[in-house]
Every structure is written in structure tokens, then in C-alpha cells.
Amino acid sequence: MKTSMKLVAAFACALAACAAHAQGAFPTRPVRIIVAYPPGGGIDVLGRQLAERLAPQWGQPVVVENRPGGSTIPAAELVAKAPADGHTILLTSDSTFSINPHLFARLPYSDRDFVPVTQLILLQQLLLANPSLPANNLAELVALAKAKPGTLNYGSYGSGSQPHLAAETLKAKAGIDIVHIPYKGLSLSIPAAIAGEVDLTFSGIASGRAQVQAGRLKALAIGGPQRSPLMPEVPTFAEQGYPEVETHAWFGLFVPAGTPRAAVERIYRDVAAILSEPGFREKNVVQKGYDLVASSPEAFAAFIVKDRAARGRAVQLSGARSE
């Protein structure tokens, strides 16, 4: 509770500071979107699509720069130290503000360094299995794992990653023993599951759906309160008796604390409008398996408080530590 109150206070102070800051024109020069992940992934593609649409609206170049690695820390540190004028925007995931504070004793940035602008999307992940695994749902998986403790394994994107936290929560709630095999990214864990190097892994619909349709993997469950319209045959974890398993990831925009409120509002308003356009939304959000959010700065800040608390419980269950 004390940690949540500190987080509320930090974001409240940042929002108040940006409101009190001088209200200048925005933008007045090229804008950089610092993406905390490598080129080509879902978060990078969405960032570039937004940049392409924002540039003509703003009358300035909008350039995407990738600063991957280091659990998103290098990208966050860069933006935290950038001028507080809205011309440097961080595009990152839940790792930066919901998970990292539980994994690292020290971080080169804090909540007070940022203003949340908008949560773009929420992404529920699939639990995927190699087709040879004799389990087609969670009940069968749990039974198999109990019959052969310590023989099944799953691939994740590393210690403390969302798949790691979700799998360890499932293990704790089901009372099973499945071995964690960390990989350095989705681009390695998915092929590993297809090749049979691991029995299970996690993926968003954008990456996993094609593999399921081709018969290279099978889907046992998906996170979230309801099934995805893109894969309605896949039941949720909650439907199968495990509502505590959180598989979601989210993408969001942040600017340095002290950024003028006018700039924060302009970024939020214009980005939300693009995301909500029917054509853009259908092609770049719905068909990728994302849930559109486009929340206000205040709503985003409140969401992070709750999300960080939930991730803290998952980290504690997993025993994850910084690598």
C-alpha cells in the first residue's frame, strides 16, 4: 500500500508540474520517439505507424529511434534526461514501470522523471504448446505436469518477463513443476517451441496466430476477461479455473516530467484520434489482436499504480531477479 501511495504521489506531482509549466507551442522542431525495443517488433511497428501519421499533422519530422536491451532501462534513462518540452517521447511497455521496480534494487530513473501520456493498447498473450505435447487445455496440461513433475518446460523472454511471471503464477496456483528456459526475446522462444526445444511458450496473437493456423503450435489458453474475436476457439485462463494468471502486456507513451501540459495534451489527443480512426484501428489494432485503450494521462497513471501492484505479486511468486 505504501509503495502504491508513493507511485500515486510521484505521477500526481509530475502531472501537476506539467500543468504549471509555461504553455508554449508544440512542436517547434523534429520529434523523437524512443522505442525501448528492436526494430520490427509489434511495439516498433505501431510506433512507426503513429510517427508517419503525426508528422504531417504536426508539421515537423517525427523520427523513431530504437534503444533496445537492458530491460528497457537505457531507453527510459535517455528520455528521463531529455529536455522537458515534449520533443522526446518514450514508447515502452509494462516492463519499465510495472515490472522493473520489483526486479532492480536501483534504477537510473524514477516515476518522478516522467509524465504518463497515454496507454496505447493492451495485449493479451497466448499460452502455446508444441503440437506433440499430449495436452490440449489447462486441465490436461496440469494433469500431465503432475504425472511427470519437472519434465515439462516453457520458454520465456527472460527472468522477470511477462511470460515468466504468468507461467510461475500458473505453477503456483496449480501446484505443478515446469522448468523455466529463458530466451533473449520472442524471436527465439517461438522457434524453440516449434522445434520442440521447449514444450510451451507465450506469444501475442500477432505472432502466435499464424503459427497456430499453420499447425506448428497449438493454443491452450489466452489471458484477459474474455476470448479474442480473432481466436474465439481459445478459452481464457479464467474460464479454465486460473483467473489469477495475468498474461497482458501494454504499450504506452511517456514524456519527461515538467513537459508543458499543452504538449502532453496535444500528443495524447492526436495519438488517440489516430488510434480511434476506424481504418487505422481495424488494420493496426484489431487485426493484430490488441485491445485499444488510448487513455488520458490521469487514467494511465492510475492504471500503472494497479498494474505495478499486481506485477509485484507475480514477481514474488516467480522468485525473479534482475539478470
Image (spheres, rainbow, N blue to C red):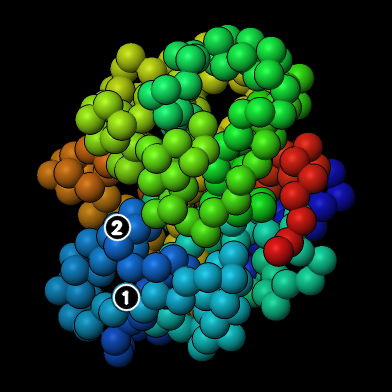
Read off the residue under disc 2.
Answer: 46
Q: Where is residue 265 drawn, in percent x and y?
A: 40, 64
Quarter of the image with the N terminus in it: top right
User: Tag on residue 309?
Assistant: none
**Residue type at the position of mark 1:** Val
Relative to 189, residue 126 above or below: above
Q: How many dots with numbers?
A: 2
**Residue type at the position of mark 2:** Leu
Residue 307: name its quadrant. Answer: top right
Mark 1: few/some/many CA within 10 Å (<14, 14-19, 20+):
many
Q: Nearer the viewer, residue 248 or 54?
A: 248
Residue 34: name its quadrant. Answer: bottom left
As drawn, is 29 to the left or to the right of 300? left
Q: CA distance from mark 1 to mark 2?
A: 11 Å
Mark 2: few/some/many CA within 10 Å (<14, 14-19, 20+):
some
Q: Nearer the viewer, residue 9 or 230?
A: 230
x 19%, y 39%: residue: 282
Q: Where is residue 134 drawn, in percent x and y?
A: 48, 15
Residue 297 visible in rendering = no
x 30%, y 62%: residue: 40
Secondary structure beneath dot 1 equals: strand
x 60%, y 34%: residue: 153
Please report contact status of discs 1 and 2: CB closer than 8 Å, yes or no. no
Secondary structure beneath dot 2 equals: helix
Q: Where is residue 170 drawn, in percent x and y?
A: 66, 26
Residue 28 visible in rendering = yes
Mark 1 / mark 2, whichever is N-terminal: 2
Q: Where is residue 214 drawn, in percent x and y?
A: 22, 30
User: Tag on residue 64?
Assistant: 1
x 51%, y 88%: residue: 83
